[in-house]
Image: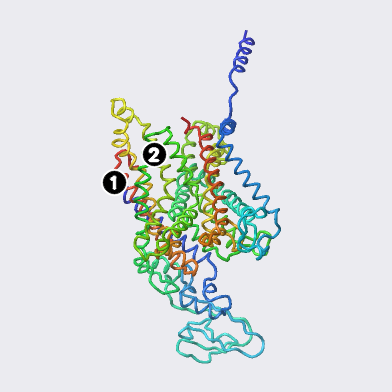
Amino acid sequence: MTETSARTETNHLQDLPQGRSLWGDAFHRLRRDRAAVASVIVIGIYAVMAVAASFLHDDFIASKNYKLSNQPPSAQHWLGTDVFGRDVLLKTMLGAKVSMTVGLMANLIAIPLGLILGALAGYFGRRVDDVVVWLYTTLASIPGIMLLIALKYAFQGKVLFRGTPFALDLGGIHGLYIALGVVSWIHTCRVVRAETLKIKELDYVTAARALGEGHARILFFHIIPNLLHLAIILFSLGFVGAITAEVILSFLGLGVEVGTPSWGTMINAARLDLVVGRWWEVTAACTAMFFIVLALNILGDRLRDALDPKLRT
Amino acid sequence: MGAYVVRRLVQAVFTIFGVMVFTFLLFRVIAGDIAAAHLGPKATLQQKKDWAHQHGYDKPLFINTGLEKHKHTVPPGEPWEIRIEAGAPENVSIGGAPAHTVAGVTLVRTEGKRIIYQVAPGEYEFTVRTGQPWYDSQFVKYIVTTATFATRSIITNEKLYSIIVERAPYSLALTVPIMAIGWAAAMFIATIVAYYRGGLLDRVGVFLSVLGMCIPYLAFIIGIQYLMFQIKPTMAYGLANPFNVFVPVGIGVLAGLGGNVRFYRTVVLDETRRDYVRTALAKGLPLRVVMFKHILKNCMLPILTNLILTVPFLIMGSLLLESFFGIPGLGDLLLSSINNRDEPIVSGLTFLTALLYVVANLATDISYVIFDPRVKLS
């Protein structure tokens, strides 16, 4: 008798539609969303361009050919040439490399930092919370672009660990990663802290505590995994911020090293070219930036819709 | 209420102090050899020392112990003459004993404050008691001068306060209209778009605002400045004609429109899902009336909060706009100070924006308590 009822129950369960995890569900939703798929493809193209650019030319910076200076777009140079006679298409691709690396590295610093500090502050409260909150309110009270400018200004000409394989050129692109990391962990930390405050009161955390699990285990096995969807959303939005900031800083001469091809240095080099009719370099840099920012913005929105069930209507 | 305001004030003071400590660490401790940057790579050690002394960069960083240490190594051979600024011979000691009693060191003479010793070959560490108070350090001076905006430019020796007074009006002439017009335009478009939500106008509006958000700010500036050069070259640069300011203002409004419309639309739509809106519609009020009389009023708080938080940018002006259009405001000052490595000005301006932000934030929080009865003090 008991055996049969158990079997019916199993059959009954099998009849139910297959459940999906949050991630599986999100993946499914994103795959059906044409705009999201298109954005992923665009981002993929930029990533491929960034990787390919490094293989296409050994030494772009030194490859100057004044005979080809400032040529308009042609069959040979699809986007024309710059003032040193270098191919603008290749330059734009190298700019994509800088932008993608900066976006990635800045977030690889900012997201884990914000995630861990935010979770610690929210979970432990009291003194830990006070210190973390004081730290981020202090940093946040300097407007983002000012803070970036101040950091990069202070970093000028500094090289850490000089002469070792880990040399960090703070005046150049490495300083840019760090400065952007320092600026953008604030937002992550704030969001994560607020979410942790909610999660730590939930039943499953109370249950884990009642079972005698330690703080570290609760934090790393129960709380942080439930914050990862936020990390993904913040990552895609942080990427946009990092790319735009890199362009503005490089434009001001505070970004990558002088001479490194980046969209910001391209716009700076060609800002007066438009008046004399040389439109291709500025246009290439601005267009390249427009599409990656558009794709990342759309993807960020769609990720938020797919991953944050509370926002679903 | 009073207790809340006091607590927020205390927090604000802590934040501002934090900003000072942070900028001090950044500009004085992390930022490298400032003397070398000003004197060029060929400057001698003595020139650098003199420069640092003149600008107070040779003082102890945090606390002045009142003791100065000088190391001297005399190579084998003839004894050397060593001059030390100390005031009197009893202020100079080596390893605790008065300097002239140590073997190998003989007091030659004193010239005013300078004491001259003849020193035999060997290594000596002179300790000079300067009698300076503990607070005579870079940190304390930095805090005091920053808080009072009394720092002086390294290049022109002008006081930061008078520079700000002179230049801020230009920045304000640029940013106040940008904020006001930008807010009104975005509010207008967002309300219309939200009114026709789901319709063609809404979708076109959202699409355009996303496009506007993604066009780089630099592209707006360069493109429109180029157009102005084609249409009316006299208006494309400088302030020869007061009307010229409308070009950068237009760019600022246009560049911010996309993001603002999108944000305001979300706020308005969030509000339309509330119960009182349903009730108003159910009792037969037309959507137009509900939208403009009820919803807009309730949307103002989040929107104004958002607006107040942009106040720091008011005074900084728009950095890029000022540099492109040759407007001598504070943003332009910041950029030229960075190029000239005018550290006191860069750090002073950083502090100014932070101060404005903290004050704006404080004002928002307090106005929330005053204007929104739902906000409870905890």
Q: Judging from the image, what secondary structure is the residue with disc 2 in?
A: helix
Q: Which mark is residue B1?
A: 1
Q: Quadrant of residue B156?
A: bottom left
Whether B272 is drawn above or below A135: the answer is above
Q: Which mark is residue B89?
A: none
Tag in front: 2 or 1: 2
**Residue denoted by label 2:** B267
Residue B213 visible in the snapshot: yes
Task: Determine whether label 2 and label 1 are within 8 Å by CB.
Answer: no
Q: Position of residue A198 (x, y in %)?
A: 46, 37
Q: Chain of mark 1?
A: B
Q: Quadrant of residue B268?
A: top left
Whether A251 is drawn above or below B281: the answer is below
Q: Position of residue B223 (x, y in %)?
A: 48, 55
Whether B54 is drawn above or below A166: the answer is below
Q: Quadrant of residue B82?
A: bottom right
Q: Nearer the viewer, residue B44 or B238?
A: B238
Please name the amino acid that badge 2 sits on: Val
From mark 2 to mark 1, how far is it between C-alphas? 28 Å
Q: Judging from the image, what secondary structure is the residue with disc 1 in?
A: loop
Within 10 Å of disc 1 (Cα), the crowding (few <14, some 14-19, many 20+) is few
Disc 2 and disc 1 on one polypeptide chain: yes
Q: Nearer the viewer, residue B375 or B8?
A: B375
Q: What residue sits 47% from the left and 72% below the top?
A: B65
Mark 2 or 1 closer to N-term? 1
